[in-house]
Amino acid sequence: MSLLEKLKKNTTIKDSAILSKSKFFNEKDMISTGVPMINVALSGSLNGGLTPGLTMWAGPSKHFKTAFSLLMAKSYMDKYPEAVLLFYDSEFGTPISYFETFQIDMDRVMHTPLTDIEQLKFDIMQQFQNIERGDKLMVVLDSIGNLASKKEVEDALEGKSVADMSRAKQVKSLFRMVTPHLNLKDIPMIVVNHTYKEIGLYPKDIVGGGTGSYYSADNIYIIGRQQEKDGTEVVGYNFIINVEKSRYVKEKSKIPISVSFDGGISKWSGLLDVALESGHVSKPSNGWYAKVDKSTGEIGDKVRLADTQTAEFMESILKDKDFQKFIQQKYEIAYGNIMGETPILEEEAEDA
């Protein structure tokens, strides 16, 4: 019996396996959202998407964080008809109309209201204890940023105004406990969080909750926002997904997503800019765009900006292998041979 076989026989951990055969490394579920550039933000690929583990959307109020979370929940529940959504709610700012907008079956949603972090920690661990790998569960927490600690609540009831030094520890403890369950049991968990500005000459956005979220999260996205106007009327927003941390996408990547009040999330958001960069689309004159056949260099008919945001214009580009490769090279983390070639030592060279 080889040493490896001995280790496998004697382990007390039932899920131990040879790495090349481990289901935790070789069987990663991936949920496409139906919005190509959100898939890119999540995985670095147009055809990728959400994976099990902890994903965090962070940003100021009214930055579409909950809507992005529900979009992913809808995608997961569409892929798995038996899937259920465990929705932890601390803000109560998600009206039923949000679920109706995304056509989420509310009979498959467990809504759990929260008042403090400890309450969340105890409940979610109790839930995870009874979940097996293969059960189709998705968790959304809205939000960790507005959730008090138990000590903070008790101090308020006792009339104390002392600073709460326990909250960051409790948040770190929460994520430390749930992270193994998410990965071992193939559970995607989406957490909504707030941001604040650091002090300095050029302040940047900082994710709230201390280091716990940074250590545990697979993906952290900080959302920026600009108004989209028609004349003086605001007709929607252009959101920028800033990749703060990712297992799959180059950090500091910026991915634009457009949302209009009339049409919701634009499926074709961000694609035009990348297609211009890759050479699959040209801009022959101001305000006009045309597709380019990369194999022949032939330029197609000119169209206005609005006409580029259609399936007729974009689908052939999305199917182009060169465009898919360009996206992956631009956004996806490349894993090469970190050791490179092993140098020959001087002593070895002399002996040769």
Image: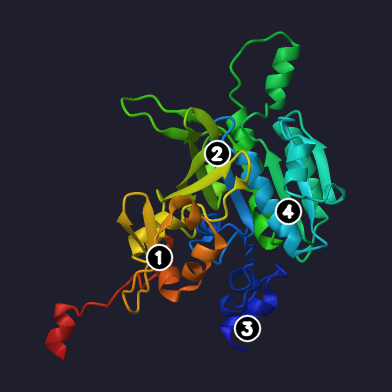
**What is the x, y in percent for residue 92?**
74, 30
- What residue sits right under mark 1 in the picture? 301
- What residue sits right under mark 2 in the picture? 58
The answer for how far apart the CA atoms under marks 2 and 4 are is: 19 Å
- The residue nearer to you, when weighing 16 against 51, is 51
**From what the image shows, is residue 149 above or below residue 137?**
above
First reached walking from the N terminus: tag 2 or tag 4: 2
Determine contact: label 1, label 4, CB under 8 Å.
no
Query: Is any atom of residue 173 visible in this view?
Result: no
First reached walking from the N terminus: tag 1 or tag 3: 3
At label 4, counting other C-alpha atoms closer than 10 Å, the crowd grade (few under 14, some 14-19, many 20 or more) is many
The answer for how far apart the CA atoms under marks 4 and 3 are is: 36 Å
The answer for how far apart the CA atoms under marks 1 and 4 are is: 45 Å
- The residue nearer to you, when weighing 345 against 328, is 328
Determine contact: label 4, label 3, CB under 8 Å.
no
The mark closer to the camera, 1 or 3, is: 1
